[in-house]
Amino acid sequence: MNKTQQKSAKRSSRHARIRAKVIGSAARPRLAVFRSNKFFYAQLIDDENAKTIGAADTRTSKAKTAGERATEIAKSIAEQAKKAGADSVVFDRGGFPYKGTIAVFADAAREAGLKF
């Protein structure tokens, strides 16, 4: 197993550990994030009804840095959550460390009015 496969396997096991504890509902949806090398994705998920309440990504963003793109996505997700009637969410960092783009996204979502 090469280094890339090892990193992916470790992230998957961390994500499984997080998902065992984090469950979203209609009142408090799960805010799941995924970060690739190029893009950043976020979804609001109601696990009880297996529905996606809202989603946003950076594929069409014109912002220059990854932090600016994450901030845009956080504001968009916060608006979608408020439209759905949820002001509080459960944060699912997807096995990624809470630093860099993930931390910037979480801070921007809090500033936009979401409670974690």
Image: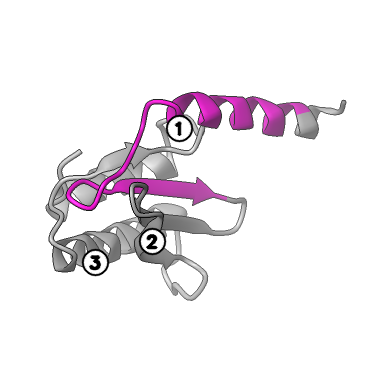
Query: For the residues marked 3 and 1, what is the alpha-carbon distance in whole angstroms?
Result: 22 Å
| Quarter the C terminus occupies | top left
| Quarter the N terminus occupies | top right
Q: Alpha-carbon neighbours of circle 3 within 10 Å: few (<14), some, or many (≥20)? A: some
Per the image, the residue denoted by label 3 is 80
* Residue in the picture at 23% in, 50% down: 109
Q: Point out residue 53 in the picture as x, y percentages from the top left corner.
A: 32, 63
Q: Secondary structure at mark 1?
A: helix
Judging depth in this view, the residue of 115 and 97 nearest the camera is: 115
Q: Point out residue 65 in the picture as x, y percentages from the top left corner.
A: 45, 58
77 on left or right of 55: left
Type of the residue with mark 2: Thr
Q: Point out residue 82 in the picture as x, y percentages from the top left corner.
A: 14, 62
Q: Secondary structure at mark 2?
A: strand
Judging depth in this view, the residue of 17 and 4 nearest the camera is: 17
User: Which contiguous range is marked in magenta?
Assistant: 6-35
Report the disc number at residue 52: 2
N-term mark: 1 or 2: 1
Report the disc number at residue 19: 1
3 on left or right of 84: right
Q: Are marks 2 and 3 in contact (CB under 8 Å)?
A: no
Q: Secondary structure at mark 3?
A: helix
Judging depth in this view, the residue of 70 and 24 nearest the camera is: 24
Q: Alpha-carbon neighbours of circle 1 within 10 Å: few (<14), some, or many (≥20)? A: some
* Residue in the picture at 75% in, 26% down: 6
N-term mark: 3 or 1: 1
